[in-house]
Image: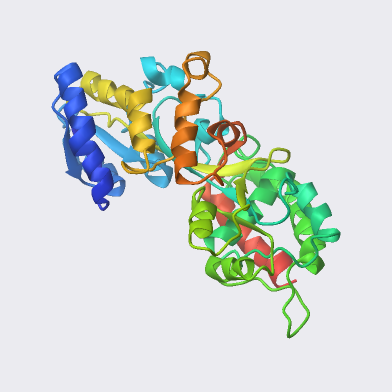
Amino acid sequence: VNFCMWSGNPTINKWVDGWLAPKVNKSFAISLTRIDLGAPKVVTKVAEEMAAMNTANGMCGLVWINGVNFKNLREAGNAYGPWADIVPNSVNFDFESTAIKYDKGVPTEGYEFPYNTAQSVFIWSGAPEAQPLSVNEIKRWLENEGKGKFAYANVTDFTGSLFVRTIFHALAGGAEVFTSPLTANAAMEARYMQKSPAVWQFLNDIKPYLYQDPATGGAIYPQTHAEVQQLMWSNLTLLDCAYDVNLAGRQIDLGNLPPHTVAYVLEGQPGTIANTNYVAIPINAQSRAASMAVGNFIGSLEAMFTRNEPEGWGALQSYNPKVPHIEGAGWNTAFNYLENHVSPAYPSVEKLAEFRLGELHSTYVERIEADWHTFVGFA
């Protein structure tokens, strides 16, 4: 099996070459070879092979993929499946979770198997146990004791866009509501126009309570997350959001944040956004059975644990901690030990999984960012 993947990280390459390949060879007599070929080139390669009538002897047997590349592979009819939700280790995942069921708004439908995930968190350096746990609680906190103690970046920064999208998920909905791309879709456009005003209203309502520019007295939207972090390091703000569950712990270790700082998920409304990446099988893979066996093994608890080990890869996993065979065997304790070994500021795997939200389709992200400029940033 040729495993096609972006190969720019030596740590990841070492896990594939030095751990995964020997394991599948010993267990299944499968020869696994890592191929330095990222998902965009794989999509093109498979399309070229199929156009040349190479329908059963394709170069790529398994590809590390997500987002627009999966969309393009699937729309071309060049993804094999469904297989991911029926192989044995599929029981380790919740395929109805929006973070797995939708790949940036595109239904996965058993054509992708979860590999790793990244999840956003809020970071709180205020009084212990006093953090706001929903978007409405954030608003109430800002209007009272938290006035001036929060800033988020302009949506041209990824974390600024993240915060705005979190509000959108809470007040308008996520991929379960906006079920197909926005472009050239009258029904989705009408739904967006109906639901999005509540988002801009919320963001304008909190504007007077955000961190204010000392010079002008008005709300500022920093251009970068680094500027937002600097406000928090200076104790000018107490709340932040980031697409990095380990950020708070690293900043505590560096002395930039107080020891009681925590990273946490919104437990009320709506949760926190996550971005799952997957493996998929091209339609013309040489041995689909062998490719499925490797994909299935990637989803084993042993494989996920080694990917989660800080010294091995440190990748967050998207398994379902509520599954009885996982919970009963103590795997959650093991995974939480790894994360607490990195930092006690880290949220538990149970909390991360319970409140994990899937990303919206990119057409909504682009529209939300543009509309923020129109209705909030420049309003």
Front-most of residues 284 and 33: 33
Percent x, y of residue 319: 47, 28
Q: Is residue 350 visible?
A: yes
**Drawn side of residue 375 relative to residue 343, left or right:** right
Q: Quadrant of the C terminus?
A: bottom right
Front-most of residues 201 and 123: 123
Q: Quadrant of the N terminus?
A: top left
**Drawn side of residue 109 relative to residue 123, left or right:** left
Q: Residue at x 58, y 44 (%)?
A: 273
Give the farthest residue toward the bottom. 215
Residue 285, above or below 344? above
Give the farthest residue toward the right. 144
Q: Residue at x 53, y 45 (%)?
A: 361
Q: Residue at x 50, y 26 (%)?
A: 332
Percent x, y of residue 71: 41, 40
The colouring scheme, among rainbow, by chain, secondary structure or one colour, is rainbow
